């Protein structure tokens, strides 16, 4: 009985580590990135791989001693975690479920803050405020109608330290998103995939 309880606790901890890896690998909602993020991901990956190898060895040892069956649960969790992580790291901006529609960056030489703005085909956006050693990412939905872009995030200006406003005019000739409020940098379009 104690062995089963220990196994369930071990599986729960293994699943929790897998969840943390997926949370760091797949950016959903607001998040930060930088050296600490990369080190945290590397630490969780090392723990996850080490735990998986231990569980795998224990399963084979139990089969060899004819004291139990092979446990498929850790293998399934490992495969799901590995597959989703690989998909995330091989896709643009780690969002394998959508693709980039417009991607651009602010002119940081003229303004204090540097940032990137990405509009995805599924109607979501990702605004990144970039500092020297870390960055912050703010996500939300957008509407682009008659070349007027509205970022549906009321607190974006405040959260991004005035790097982004919420209303822009898309100028396809000069390849820029021009802010409709004063005091904000233009977003220079580096990629525009036309539908």
Image: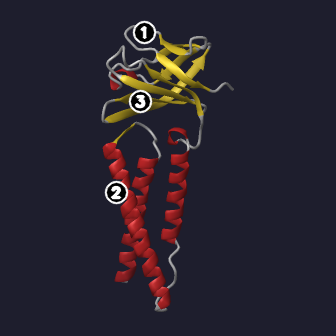
Task: From the viewer's side, name the closer residue of 14 and 36.
Answer: 36
The residue identified by callout 2 is: 43
Q: How is the image coloured?
A: secondary structure
110 relative to 121 in the view: left or right: left
Residue 188: x, y in percent? 50, 18
SS for dot 3: strand
- In three-dimensional space, the C-alpha distance between marks 2 and 1, rounded to whole angstroms, equals 43 Å
Residue 33 against residue 164 in the figure, above or below: below
Residue visible at 51% across and 69% down? Answer: 75
Mark 2: few/some/many CA within 10 Å (<14, 14-19, 20+): few
The residue identified by callout 3 is: 128
Q: Earlier in the sequence, mark 2 or mark 3?
A: 2
- In three-dimensional space, the C-alpha distance between marks 2 and 3, rounded to whole angstroms, equals 25 Å
Residue 160: x, y in percent? 36, 25
Residue 49 against residue 126 in the figure, above or below: below
Query: In the picture, residue 108 is in which quadrant?
Result: top left
Q: Earlier in the sequence, mark 1 or mark 3?
A: 3
SS for dot 2: helix
Q: Earlier in the sequence, mark 2 or mark 1?
A: 2
Q: Which mark is residue 181?
A: 1
């Amino acid at each position: 009985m104690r062995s089963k309880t220990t196994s369930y606790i071990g599986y729960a901890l293994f699943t929790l580590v897998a969840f943390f890896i997926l949370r760091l690998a797949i950016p959903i909602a607001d998040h930060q990135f930088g050296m600490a993020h990369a080190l945290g991901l590397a630490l969780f990956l090392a723990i996850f791989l080490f735990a998986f190898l231990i569980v795998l060895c224990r399963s084979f040892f139990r089969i060899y001693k004819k004291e139990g069956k092979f446990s498929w649960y850790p293998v399934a969790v490992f495969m799901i975690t590995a597959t989703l992580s690989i998909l995330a790291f091989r896709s643009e901006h780690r969002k394998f479920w959508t693709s980039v529609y417009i991607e651009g960056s602010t002119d940081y030489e003229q303004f204090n803050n540097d940032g990137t703005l990405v509009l995805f085909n599924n109607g979501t956006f990702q605004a990144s405020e970039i500092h020297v050693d870390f960055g912050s990412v703010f996500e939300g939905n957008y509407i682009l109608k008659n070349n007027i872009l509205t970022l549906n995030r009321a607190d974006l200006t405040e959260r991004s330290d005035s790097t982004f406003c919420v209303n822009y005019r898309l100028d396809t000739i000069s390849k820029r998103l021009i802010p409709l409020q004063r005091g904000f940098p233009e977003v220079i379009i580096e990629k525009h995939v036309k539908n």
